[in-house]
Image (tube, helix red, strand yellow):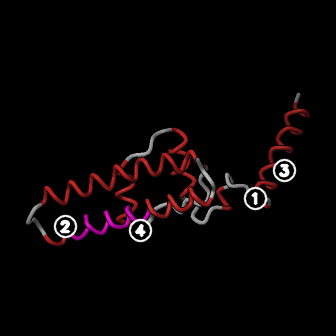
Amino acid sequence: MKAIEDKIQGQINKLKELRKTKACSTARVNLKNSADADVYKRADEGTLTSARVIERAKKGQLVDGSGATCEELDKLLEVDKKAVKFEKDKLEAMGGGDAATKKIVSDAEKAIEAQVAKLQAKKKAKKCI
């Protein structure tokens, strides 16, 4: 039994190494930003949130999108569009509020809008339906 387990583990290790060298889109090491893998995972699990999109936008850490599947791109776009709407509504509700806070919200909104355009271009380049 132990010999079989060792053989299986050896095969798993070989496959992990092969994934790194073959530029598989699922390999974290092949992503432009390894943190994108966590976002893609949340897309697969259906747990993406607008709040996280907004937070990443404020930090300048939006996903690249090049390692995403067509389905993941659809989910990312859906949540990003909700985040843009949320930020626009927030700006409208702020009215004549604090200029510094308004700038932060406005910058996040613009970053997410740019992200939506970028992801739509990735989707088109991948010939997603």
> What whole-number distance in Å separates the C-alpha atoms at marks 1 and 2?
43 Å
**Looking at the image, residue 118 lies above or below residue 82:** below
C-alpha distance separating marks 1 and 4? 27 Å
On residue 20, which mark appears? 1
Q: Quadrant of residue 18?
A: bottom right
Side (left or right) of 81 relative to 14? left
Predominant secondary structure in magenta? helix
Q: CA distance from mark 4 to mark 3?
A: 36 Å
Magenta-tinted stretch: 103-115
Disc 2 to disc 3, how far (Cα)? 52 Å
Residue underneath mark 3: 14
Q: Which SS class for mark 1?
A: helix
Mark 2 closeness class: few <14, some 14–19, many ≥20 residues within 10 Å: some
Q: Are marks 2 and 4 in contact (CB under 8 Å)?
A: no
Q: Residue at x 85, y 38 (%)?
A: 8
Query: Which numbered disc, 2 or 3, marks the residue closer to the eye?
Result: 2
Query: Where residue 67 sits in the image (x, y, percent)?
Result: 62, 57
Instruction: Identify the residue position indicated by label 4 in the image.
Output: 60
Viewer-closest of 55 and 67 = 67
Quickly name the residue at label 2: 102
Query: Which quadrant holds residue 95?
Result: bottom left
The residue under label 1 is which amino acid type? Lys
> Observer-nearest residue: 59 or 85?
85
Q: Position of residue 4 (x, y in %)?
A: 89, 32
